[in-house]
Amino acid sequence: MQKKLTIGHSPCPNDTFIFHALTSGLVDWPGGLDLTLADVEELNGLAAEGALDVVKVSTAAAAGILDEYVLLRAGGAMGYGAGPVLVARQGRTLDSLDGGTVAIPGERTTANLIFGLCCREAGIAVRRAPMVFDRVMDAVRAGRADAGVVIHEGRFTFAERGLVRVLDLGAWWEAHTGLPIPLGAIAIRRSLGDDTARRMNEAIRRSLLYARAHPEAGREYIRQNAQELSGDVIRTHIETFVTDYSLDAGEAGAGAVARLLAEAGCRRPDIFIEL
């Protein structure tokens, strides 16, 4: 009998859109799935502890778990025009942040890694203040941080909060590499074996295809987990972060992940499952 697997992803609209059909049983997984919904940095920590069988992680965080996990080619968040944004109150520039405090959405996030690369290139040093992603803008507005790195819906809502863009970190990555920005990926325990990994990859693909063919099926589930987000923001969020790379990373996507992991000090050849 197939063992029940533990699976974790974030409550953000892109993840709930992709996984709803699978975790609700519309796409069958023999043995069933035990779902954990958590912030991406919490998921990064759970992956580091080996606490879940299948888990959405920041791509940067994958560098520290690849002895125990391998990445699937489906289910990730990757694309162009989808990266994190450095925001601040009026009048700030990147150079003016030297010596200042920048709020970040977790130390293991892809956003933090790319922000660090930008700081290195600019020759500036900042104090980074890690916090849950949805507290970053409040910290900047209240003056507890000089700037903040926003992810998820913050990319679309920072102007409404009276903040301005200092630097589009995703555009910076694209200009420097010519590659899509690999924000997040799905990791599965290597100990489960290649066959289970391939079947999970296909199940996630089918779940996403179901969501695209039947968008009404998961609409209420997505809305409930998106908390305060408007319908327009939810729709834009999904359109931005769920791309064809979410169906299959492909050659360009795999190259982007390998490049990012190399920046994090990981150059192993067996990052992805073999299909």
Image (cartoon, rainbow, N blue to C red):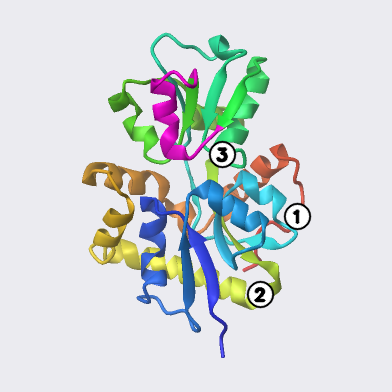
Q: Which residue is mark 3?
A: 106
Q: Residues within 10 Å of mark 2 (few under 14, many from 20)?
A: few
Q: Nearer the viewer, mark 1 or mark 2?
A: 2
Q: Nearer the viewer, mark 3 or mark 2?
A: 3
Query: At label 2, which amino acid type do we have?
Result: Leu
Residue 269: mark in rendering = 1
- Callout 3: SS: loop
In this view, the mark in front (3 or 1): 3
Q: Are marks 3 and 2 in contact (CB under 8 Å)?
A: no
- Screen quadrant of the C terminus: bottom right
Using a 10 Å C-alpha cutoff, classify the residue at mark 3 as few (fewer than 14 neighbours), some (14 to 19) or many (20 or more): many
Decide which of tag 3 and tag 2 comes sooner along the chain: 3
Q: Say if 221 sits above or below 236 in the image.
A: below
Residue at horizontal 44 percent and vertical 26 percent from the top:
139
Measured in 3D between alpha carbons, the distance from the residue under mark 1 to the one under mark 2, in whole angstroms, is 19 Å
Please identify the quarter of the rendering in which residue 223 is found.
bottom left
Instruction: Give the amino acid type for the residue marked by disc 3 in the picture.
Output: Gly
Q: Quadrant of residue 207?
A: bottom left
Q: Residue at x 41, y 46 (%)?
A: 241
Q: Is residue 145 magenta?
A: yes
In the image, residue 110 lies in the stretch drawn in magenta: no
**Residue 36 at what x, y percent from top left?**
48, 63
Residue 208: x and y in percent read 39, 63
